[in-house]
Image: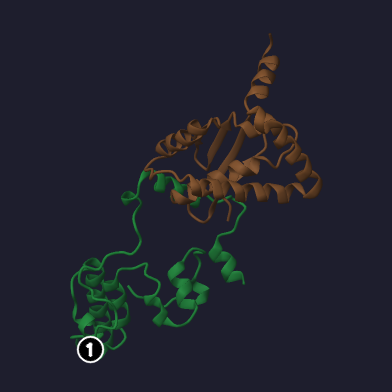
Chain colours: A brown, B green
Amino acid sequence: MHSPELLDYYRAHACSRQWRLFLLALAEEFDSALPEAELARLMARIGERFAQAHGLPLAATLEELQAAANAVWSQIDWGCVVFEESVERVCIHHAASPLSAVLGGKVGWHTGFLEGVYRQWFRAAGMLPVLDIRHTPSELVDVSTYTLSRVS
Amino acid sequence: MNKILQPAELKDPDDVAGLFQRLGDRGQMRVYREFPQGQLQATTAVIPAVELPVPPPVPLSAAVAASAHADVIATAEVPTKTAALEGGSMASSQGATPVVVTAERKTPLEQLFLRLAEVRSAAEPSPLSRLREA
């Protein structure tokens, strides 16, 4: 059995069967009704609403914030995240979300949900107004990457 | 030393103090709180020479005023006669503390945000230079 087959098996089981077909139909309708940019914005607002409902405890370090975020994701089986700090940015790598498992490779706007989640979490943690989080395109279907950096 | 900068003398694009002076109302300086209150009070008190205990000759009074001014700068938290003469219009000079919060008081995460906020691309002009060009 090769890696692509393993990944396909993983993706087929990463999202509950109860919701998989529903999400596919929803995505198809969204795609036909709204531009991708608008859909991404809508998903971001949904993500911010989610983050407000599942706020993280106060964190003094980036590592603490990462651990708090992973505690939330672990509770609902939504994959895991790694924050990678560099000189000019923080890269946010979220792996194995069920949304990516179902819609990854089919649409791009689904990444807006996690963008909104992390934007709200980092704002609550003290992110300054000149900073923001943006999705960074990558070839990895199962990993959504975002960049926290200065935008103005 | 206090020096009223003329626009032509503002060579440093990030000379924030000079920019505010250029904008006009020096009374607004008290809103821009980069300097400790004691230094601001000494700065505005230099003009009325009669209020300073100095001899009449102009060159000597200027030197004494500059010296007194330098002393105030060096000991910004010490109450001075100029503070009393100001009639308390400025905030008390006792225990004057800078408004700018140092990075050392912040958590590592907050320091990270500050560091990222200071990153600026090489092609992007400074905000002050854009304001001066407007």
Pointer 1: residues within 10 angstroms few (<14), some, or many (20+)?
few
Position in image of residue A149 (x %, y %): 55, 46
Residue tagged by mark 1? B51
Residue at 68 percent of width and 23 percent of height: A12
Question: In this picture, is B67 found above or below A152?
Answer: below
Left/right of residue B54 with respect to residue B130 in the rendered view:
left
Q: Residue furthest top?
A: A1
Q: Quadrant of the C terminus of chain B?
A: bottom right
Q: Nearer the viewer, residue B122 or A127?
A: A127
Q: Examine the image and state in which quarter residue B94 appears.
A: bottom left
Residue at 55 percent of width and 44 percent of height: A117
Residue at 50 percent of width and 49 percent of height: A52
Count of residue discs: 1
Position in image of residue A97 (x %, y %): 60, 32
Tell me if residue A60 can be seen.
yes
Q: Quadrant of the N terminus of chain B?
A: bottom left
Q: Residue furthest front?
A: A18
Q: Examine the image and state in which quarter residue B50 appears.
A: bottom left
Position in image of residue B129 (x %, y %): 56, 65
The disc numbered 1 marks a residue on which chain?
B
Q: Nearer the viewer, residue B97 or A42?
A: A42
Left/right of residue A126 with respect to residue A108 in the rendered view:
left
For label 1, the SS is helix
Tell me if residue A133 can be seen.
no
Q: Nearer the viewer, residue A125 or B132?
A: A125
Left/right of residue A150 with respect to residue A58 in the rendered view:
right
Position in image of residue B111 (x %, y %): 40, 47
At label 1, which amino acid type do we have? Answer: Glu
